[in-house]
Image (spheres, rainbow, N blue to C red):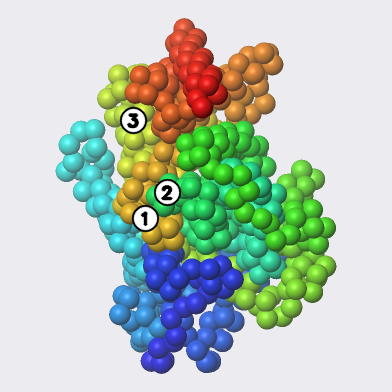
Amino acid sequence: MTQPAAPPDDLLPEDELSKLSEEQRHKVEEFIEEEEGSFNRYKGWLAAFLTGVAVITSAFHLYAAYGIVRTDLLRGIHVGLILFLSFMLFPVAKRFRHRLMWFDVALALLSVATIGWMIYGGDAFTDRNTSPETWDIVFGVALMVLVIEATRRTSGWIMPIVIGLFLVYAFVGPWLPHPWTHRGYDLSRMVGHMYMTLEGIFGTAVDVSATLIILFTIYGAFLQYSGAGKFFLDFSFSLMGGKSSSAGRAVVMSSFLLGGPSGSGVATTVTIGSVAYPMLAKSGYEPAAAGGLLAAGGLGAILSPPVLGAAAFLIAEFLKISYLEVIKMAVIPTILYYFSLYFMVELDARKYGMSEGVFEAVESAWTLSKRYWYHFLSLASIVVFMMMGFSPTLAVFWATVTAFAVSFFHRETALFPRRFVKAMETGTTGVLNVAATCASAGIIVGVVTLTGLGLKFSSIVIDYAGGSLALTAVYTALIVWIVGLAVPVTASYIICAVIAAPALITLGVPDFAAHMFIFYYALLSEVSPPTALSCFAAAAITGADPYKTTLQAWKYTMPAFVVPFFFVLDPLGAGVLLQLPKGGSWMEVAWVVFLIFVAIAALAAGLQGWLLKKTNLLERAMLVVAGTLVIIPVGSLDAVGVGLFAAVFVIQMLRHKRANAVAGTTP
């Protein structure tokens, strides 16, 4: 055993941590650990060894992006390295933290052995998947247990419990009532499918983790250690300074710029919040409202191009389309999400009576841009490389190379050896929880494909909905949301993509629209208790009640979640929002976008209780009804919804003029 290390002090950039009090810092680190797992910190030779393994892991994946590595080898080595590091770096329980126990080493070595056996077997190993040998079963069961345990260590108990329920379903199929019944599978068949093919643990989710997610994590680490993240934050605050809603606007903009590279809603929330909260408080935000806005910004970060969250890579793989197509599909929904946040911020400015000149930027946006303009190059290069015909894997490889090269444009951002090693290490350690989740999700996907659960579940949902597309969409949204209460965004999307998406597709929804619908609602887990970690982290910074902060985050985010219903309920809406419009005139396109803006604005004003001025109960009800009617796919109701919104706007305008006239005549 090694000596306990000092408590971790680098979960966040040091310059951001320094802005928090000791109590805030401790709470924030707890929430980050809850999302990413309790992390061991070692000293001496062991720390150097594990750093070396992490750097080699990043180097291997960068080589695999540019070189040629067989698919089965890449996936197997990826899982082996991830499991090895997970058992070495994440304790079995918090009381063993910062101590390497003998059983951690044993599990880490067993992880390598299971992959070694697979690689040693070669093609013969895969060919005997329907009749595994004794050692195949031993190593296969071991790998399944190791994957589940690694997921428990990095993400908590919920995901392993869900996996256990799916495995039980696979074994007891013949004894289940209709329509859940199936033939049932024994241990040999399960091992053959999960361990000896590319349909279980080494399936789509692990493929995406090995070829895209880890590369984007490495890229994000290069941006972090080259100072790009700090530049994006400073640039946003400088650009938005000097107006009544400047602090809120800066949160919205910086969450967009920072979120894509970070890939973490909690990290984005905390990084921005440590800087922004004092300004939000000075502007007039209540602590819970400030925390809700920070959490909403962190949520938007996960769906912001060009990087998006890990689930976006899975969309590309499930649909067999390029990642560039996913980026295109995400552009308009992302704009609408940030429009919703921006509109809410503008309403905040009126609601809280914010004063002008909230803060003064230390340096102007122009000065910052002249000095650090090169940080925009790597961010733009991802899209540029993909538009040039590069695969997403090669695009992010060259974007990482670009980030490394441009860092030397300024001495203080240069990735000299120490920073370079730290970026390579962080690129691997930052992906461990997501990669373990992807491997364990492969077990769930394997059960679904073996048992045909996806089709069964779809037929059940459609039956309950009476064949109604609108009800099926509502039920699907609820299912995704409920699953998201228990598991992270990536796992939520994977599970629901295989069990819930077929119901929408069966009723005529385009597959791309169905998957984007599920992706959107999977994101709600970031701001939904009991796993609303972004909200709880924001509450730790603001000092507000965590659940009041969660309600405020819902207020900020819910208007944007009307958008996915346009994906599935309106064929023209799906084409307009996710693809180039097909078969519709530009007038029809403009009308759909206008309706969405009205729905978002009406719901935002209704939830805020403020439009031009504070709304009364009747006006608030009219706004919520107006937004709801526009969402319902009936043409006549659209007109009623727009009319209600216009009526409230006119009433508010008259009240506003009357109040100004009275104020003008008052001595």
Q: How many marks?
A: 3
Q: Say left or right for 52 vs 545.
A: right
First of labels 2, 3 by sequence position? 2
Quarter of the figure with the N terminus = bottom left
- Image position, residue 371 (x, y; %): 81, 62
Label at residue 286: 2
- Reply above or below: 631 against 553: above
Q: Residue furthest front?
A: 667
- Kind of residue at disc 3: Tyr
Q: Is residue 171 toward the left or the right of residue 533 in the image?
A: left
Does residue 133 show up?
no
Q: Which residue is mark 1?
A: 544
Q: Is residue 309 above or below residue 434?
A: above
Q: Nearer the viewer, residue 31 or 125?
A: 31
Residue assigned mark 3:
475
Residue 60: quadrant of the picture: bottom right
Residue 145, percent from left and from top: 33, 66
What is the CA distance from the residue labelled 3 to the residue labelled 1? 33 Å
* Residue displayed at 57% across by 44% down: 355
Which three-letter amino acid code belongs to the residue tagged 2?
Glu
Closest to the camera, between mark 3 and mark 1, is 1
Q: Residue at x 60, y 22 (%)?
A: 593
Label 2, label 1: how many angstroms apart (C-alpha)?
9 Å
Q: Nearer the viewer, mark 2 or mark 1?
A: 2
SS at badge 1: loop
